[in-house]
Image: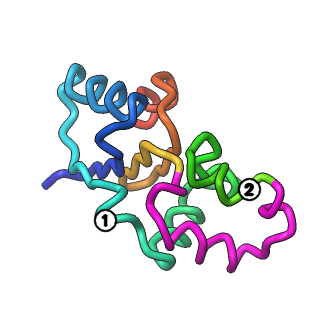
Amino acid sequence: MIKIKVYCYSKCTTCKKALKWLDDNKIEYQLIDIRENHPDEETLRQLHKKSGLSLKKFFNTSGQLYREMELSKKLPDMSEDDMFKLLASDGMLVKRPLLITRDKVLTGFKEDDWREAL
């Protein structure tokens, strides 16, 4: 049974790097297309709690949709509930790759962090 899930977007260069790293290190994973099967609100709440990260770390701040919606201006005044609803509305708002193991959740790809987690 594969214990690692990775939410990715196929055109994302960071996701491609992360998947190559997993493959090079012979780490099995379940790949989930974040655009087609993005996490719902309840899943995001669980992942956020498990991650220990600030909820803002779950936003793809370099994404086109994030910029179009001017979220850098809006997030500071949003409630956590509203942020979760927004993240759940579109996978392109979620920072990727999103790595989920039995006891860790990481947003983005930093090789040292992934090595330590896996």
Say what secondary structure mark 1 lies in: loop
Give the labeled residue for mark 1.
37
- Main SS, magenta region, reads helix
Tell me residue 12's x, y (percent): 39, 36
Tell me residue 36's x, y (percent): 29, 63
84 to the left or right of 112:
right
Q: Amino acid at mark 1?
A: Asn
Q: Amino acid at mark 2?
A: Glu
**In the image, residue 59 above or below residue 12:** below
81 magenta-colored: yes
Magenta-drawn segment: 73-94
Give the labeled residue for mark 2.
70
Residues under numbered marks 1 and 2 in contact, where contact means CB atoms less than 8 Å apart: no
Location of the C terminus by quadrant is: top left
Residue beneath the point at 77% across and 52% down: 72
Mark toward the viewer: 1 or 2: 2
Residue beneath the point at 44% across and 48% down: 98
112 to the left or right of 17:
right
